[in-house]
Amino acid sequence: MAILFYDHLITKSEIEDLICTLEEEENQKGKALQLIDDIIFQGIVGFLLEKLEPHHHHTFLTTVHERPYDPEILSYLKDHLGTNIEDEIRLEADKLVKMILRDLQAEQN
């Protein structure tokens, strides 16, 4: 997936390491990593939409769609959700990563 405004807040190396150890073709591993990126993206965007007032949804979604890499998205979120939003995104991302890891490990057993 492309660079996203929240990438520096997420640590998914455990997932990447686990995927790399699978006895699958490289293209299948790549597809799995893409799906994981999509799951995290949907989770983070959903989390932020729940926190934002409905009248801010359109601006947020349009900006994320047009410029998902733009660090100004975090500035926008800080203005509307508070300066600690990066910590909240980090915590939400950690929950998502743990959930994905748990599911992947359950599939291996």
Image: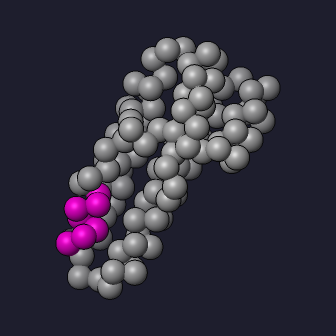
Q: Is residue 60 left or right of residue 15?
A: right
Horizontal and vertical percent position of residue 105: 25, 63
Horizontal and vertical percent position of residue 16: 29, 60
In the rendered view, would you say 47 is above or below 83? below
Q: Is residue 94 left or right of residue 48?
A: left
Which colouring convention does the figure follow?
A: one colour
- In which image quadrant can residue 30 be found? bottom left
Magenta: main secondary structure equals helix
Horizontal and vertical percent position of residue 19: 28, 68
Residue at 31% x, 64% y is 104
In the rendered view, would you say 51 is above or below 106? above
Horizontal and vertical percent position of residue 39: 49, 55
Residue at 55% x, 43% y is 69
Is-magenta flag for residue 10?
A: no
* Span colored in magenta: 15-21
Quadrant containing the C terminus in the rendered view:
bottom left
Is-magenta flag for residue 16?
A: yes
Residue 17 in view here:
yes
Q: Is residue 10 left or right of residue 81?
A: left
